[in-house]
Image (cartoon, grey):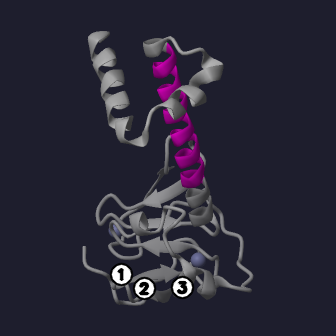
Amino acid sequence: MADNLDIINCPACHNAMTKVHFPDLGINIDVCTEGCGGIYFDNRELEKFDEAQEDITPILKSIKDKKFEEVDTSEPRMCPVCGTKMVRHYNDIRKEVMIDECYNCGGVFLDNRELFKIREAFKKVEKEGSQEAVDEFNKMLVATFKVPESGVIDFIKKFPKSSTMQLFEALCTNMYKNM
Ligand SMILES: [Zn+2]
Ligand SMILES: [Zn+2]
């Protein structure tokens, strides 16, 4: 759906939302700067801001030094763009952040600070995900080459950088053999 340029009212506190422009992305995000601090994203816009390295400076500027009113998060919300009742559900498998989503137009509403929680959760998943990969790789080394667990680092160091691919190939061949 195209970026919506009309002023919309916040689905949580009903104040008029402020357009926050991202010139590089060519999109506007609606932020409830005068009410509850909630943020409304048109269809697929949230994915441009949910990863910790993605720039949200214009959003931070728009809410800087503002005091936001509390809202009742149990109240059903209506999509401010198409009027459909929004569905409240968890944003990710960790069940840390609840978001309101419009299944008609794809809009998403986040309450005050929820965007930061989503970005934090993303950082955690990334970190733990890469640690998991390292653990898995180490396990494969131990199993394939009978390297003692304490000696994995020394074992890898013995390989010249150019043969890292060979090491991977050897590991993969062994993995497929055992499948
Ligand atoms: Zn609001
Ligand atoms: Zn909608």
Q: Residues within 10 Å of mark 1 (few under 14, many from 20)?
A: few
Which residue sits furthest left? 1
- Residue type at numbered disc 1: Leu
- Tell me the CA gap for discs 1 and 2: 5 Å
Q: x%, y% of residue 94?
A: 56, 41
The numbered mark at residue 22 is: 2
Task: Tell me if label 1 and label 2 are in contact, CB under 8 Å.
Answer: yes
Magenta stretch, main secondary structure class: helix
- Tell me the CA gap for discs 2 and 3: 7 Å
- Residue type at numbered disc 2: Phe
x 65%, y 63%: residue: 72
Q: x%, y% of residue 163?
A: 36, 35
Quadrant showing the C terminus: top left
Q: How crowded is mark 3: few (under 14 residues within 10 Å), some or many (20 or more)?
A: some
The answer to which of 57 and 96 lies nearer the viewer is 57
Q: x%, y% of residue 91?
A: 49, 51
x 36%, y 72%: residue: 42
Residue placed under numbered mark 3 in the picture: 58
The answer to which of 143 and 105 lies nearer the viewer is 143
Residue placed under numbered mark 1 in the picture: 25
- Is residue 130 on the magenta stretch? yes
Mark sitting earlier along the chain (2/3): 2
- Is residue 72 on the magenta stretch? no
What secondary structure is marked by label 3? helix
Instruction: Tell whether circle 3 marks a residue whose Cβ is less than 8 angstroms from ligand 1.
Output: no
Provide the residue span drawn in magenta. Answer: 121-142
What secondary structure is marked by label 2? strand
